[in-house]
Amino acid sequence: MKNRYLAYLAVVSILISSCGIAKKQVKSVTPIKSEIQEKTISEDDKNEFEYTFIEGLKQKMIGNQQAAVTMFSKCLEINPNSSSAMFELAKIHLGNGDQTSSSLLLEKAINIDPANKWYKLLLAQIFQQGKQYLKAATLYQQLHTLDPENLEYQYLNAALLSSAQKYDQAIEAYDKLEKKIGINDQISVEKQQIYQAAGKKKEAQAELQKLIDFNPREPRYYGLMADFYLSEKDEVNALKYYQKILEIDPENGFVLFSLTSFYRQKEDKEKAWEYIRKGFLNKSVEVDTKIQYFLMMNAEKETPFFTEDQVGELVNILVKTNPDDYRVYTVYAEFLIQKGKLAEAREQLRKVLQTEKDNYVIWERLLFISNDLLDFKSIFTDSEKALDLFPNQVNLYGLRAVACLQLEKYTEALDVLKEGEPYLLDNKPMKIQFDLYRAEANYKLDRVEEAFKAFDEVISLDPENWLAMNNYAYYLSIRNENLEKAEELGSKAVRANPENPTYLDTYAWVLFMRKDYSLAKFYMDTAMKNGGDKNGVIVEHYGDILFMLGEKDKAIGLWKNALETGEGSKLLSEKIKQGRYLDK
């Protein structure tokens, strides 16, 4: 009986402002000032306010947000001017994604208590997230006024003014900051970018020159100047500053990769290769930089700049110069996969697992490669090791079940599926696969009723699961049971996959069992034209059909061809010997 199942079917925030500044997290601190001490409310109201406010904090702490909202709202009923209650409500609304309500409450709280920095910090964060940069900048300026020694406020004010495209004001703010802390490369770069965005190229260039004059032995400053000229399409000056870096630091990895990119843009393959090779051989360049550059370069699948041999040399350099870094072996493996060298890629991943056995991604990649290689013995062995480490990964159970099916370990396949079932959760695609594997295992164990029930479940969950329909139809046909249903299932599979030789063969065989030999021959002809002539089972079936149509000599010839493939039914040799069709 032919095996219709070949391989596993794989189914497989931090908010940052546009100005590039990581937002300062607002601490969950209740302001010290308490409105319960105000003389405008009675002593009883003060006590009730205090109790309600503390209860609100308690409910918030245990995660009962709705109860906390109720408590803080009640606080505002007692004292409508309680900025502390407004602040707490604002934080809850913000946590629920309601920035509008949160900002309105904070603005009111700030009007009541303008000296409270926590209110302004949280509101500035909201404005920053909402890209209301000018409003956020204004708040940071106010915070700086309240705390002149906090230079972070001044820096954030300047950066947000830049994001708001208030370039003159941003430059003025950076200048004030620079007077306090002196020449600073971060500030100079920010100013250079502002000047460049404003179209003031001379001023932008002057900012970078200031850094070079400040420290003429710092290669990075020349690199910034080179990048500036490159962005202005001034290749002559860009190259001049790149070369200056090499004069100062001949082994500078940064410039080697920068020059690689420079010459790639100029389509100078010889120069680009010279510098990228030097960069990969350079021991001072971090392996992270090399890997990132390699991955970026190797992603160019349509029009690769470097030859396949050159790319291979680079990845070999990576491995040889960083033998203790597991990541280079994963890069090498992906390179080999792209070249179709799956077995070699798998060996590289095995090297990774020698030191990184707890890396699930590597295990899964290894198993999928074995699946592509149809190496079910390796899947069986490796999946057991992986499951010992990752018993909650449902894909591993699916892969192991397929290996069991292919190795005719049908009872073990059912056991594996049962073990993996608790980890399916709401993963419908994997549930469908599990049911399909269960159907196959049960059928091979001659538990026909359980098998067909599982096939029905698969088709119910996935009405376009052609593999399930095909296998179900085939099993019905060879048992000569419910041929009407088998024909319906086979027909659907063929209509959706009109060139699939296996599905065509199944449908033809259903028709054969229904004694519709002429129509069976029509579909079998199509199967043979689409690669079925290389499959011994399909060839044998074709011979059976032709025999029934009276073409005995052709039928015997096909049976002999099928026998040579090593496939076919147990009766194949006897058919040839007796020169007639046998079904038992």
Image (cartoon, grey):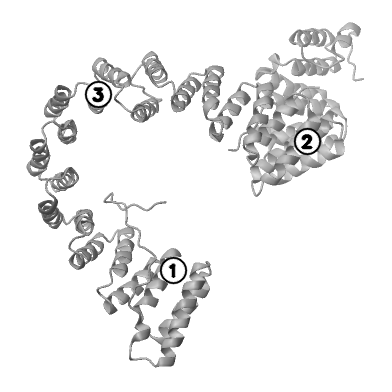
Location of residue 170 in the rendering, given as x and y in whole percent from the top left corner = 15, 55
Location of residue 545 in the rendering, given as x and y in whole percent from the top left corner = 81, 19
Residue picked out by circle 1: 92
Q: Amino acid at mark 2?
A: Leu
Q: Quadrant of residue 39?
A: bottom left
* Vertical relation: 135 (above or below) 462: below
Q: Residues within 10 Å of mark 3 (few under 14, many from 20)?
A: many
Left or right: where 424 falls relative to 152: right
Q: CA distance from mark 1 to mark 3?
A: 51 Å
Q: Nearer the viewer, mark 1 or mark 2?
A: 1
* Vertical relation: 198 (above or below) 351: below
Q: Quadrant of residue 215?
A: top left
Q: Looking at the image, which residue is at 13% across and 58% down?
A: 169
Q: Amino acid at mark 1?
A: Ile
Look at the numbered disc 1 and give the secondary structure of its residue. helix
Does the image show residue 4? no
Residue picked out by circle 3: 256
Does the image show residue 138? yes
* Vertical relation: 203 (above or below) 306: below
Look at the numbered disc 3 and give the secondary structure of its residue. helix
Look at the numbered disc 2 and give the secondary structure of its residue. helix
Residue picked out by circle 2: 414
Q: Which mark is residue 27?
A: none
